[in-house]
Image: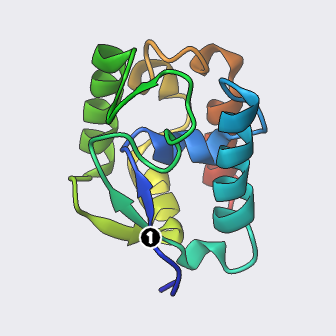
């Protein structure tokens, strides 16, 4: 496992990270997410990065303009997404897994073509970035 500090993630951010392509809510948010996703998870050896599951604001949320303390101005929607993703990926607050283990869990538990249901209500879902990334993950041997 990675020796760096774990990345703290809400359950829905696992799939957001899979589909991230440099877009975000603000310049600060996008730079932070790029540092985590591109600089840690997708960097050489990134599959060993440890992620700790939380049900509150996490490392991705830190600079988000929609953040309110440990929550979000879209709290009900975020709670629904987190609940659906936690169930689909069998995640609970306090769980720790590597990014490689997370990708294997996504591949085993989230069928290609299912994000319209799993991510219902997410403003990014209609763009298809996460669905395309999920299809690529399923195509890997």
Which of the 4 image quarters holds residue 108? bottom left
Location of mark 1 (residue): 6
Task: Report the side of 45 relative to 120 (left or right).
Answer: right
Q: Residue at x 41, y 59 (%)?
A: 105
User: Is residue 113 shown above or below 38?
Assistant: above
Q: Could you tell me residue 118's position as x and y percent?
A: 40, 26
Would you place residue 67 above or below residue 15 in this image?
above
Does residue 141 appear in this view? no
Q: Residue at x 69, y 29 (%)?
A: 24
Percent position of residue 102, x then y: 45, 61
| Image quadrant where one finds the C terminus | bottom right
Query: How dense is the environment of label 1, judged by Cα within 10 Å: few (below 14), some, or many (20 and up)?
Result: some
Instruction: Look at the picture and state if 140 lies above or below 5.
Output: above
Closer to the camera in the image, 108 or 72: 72
Query: Is 133 placed above or below 99 here?
Result: above
Residue 83 as seen in the image, left or right of residue 114? left
User: Relative to the observer, which residue lies in front, 52 or 101?
Assistant: 52
Residue 82, visible in the rendered structure: yes
Provide the secondary structure element on which disc 1 rests.
loop
């Amino acid at each position: 496992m990675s020796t760096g500090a774990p990345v703290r993630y809400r359950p829905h951010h696992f799939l957001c990270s899979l589909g991230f392509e440099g877009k975000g809510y603000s310049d600060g948010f996008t730079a932070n997410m790029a540092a985590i996703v591109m600089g840690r998870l997708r960097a050489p050896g990134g599959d060993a990065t440890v992620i700790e599951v939380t049900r509150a604001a996490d490392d991705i949320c830190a600079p988000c303009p929609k953040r309110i303390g440990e929550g979000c101005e879209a709290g009900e929607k975020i709670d629904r997404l987190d609940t659906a993703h936690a169930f689909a990926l069998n995640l609970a607050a306090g769980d720790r897994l590597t990014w490689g283990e997370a990708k294997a869990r996504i591949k085993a538990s989230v069928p290609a073509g299912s994000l319209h249901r799993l991510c219902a209500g997410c403003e990014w879902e209609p763009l298809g970035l996460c669905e395309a990334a999920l299809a690529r993950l399923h195509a890997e041997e």
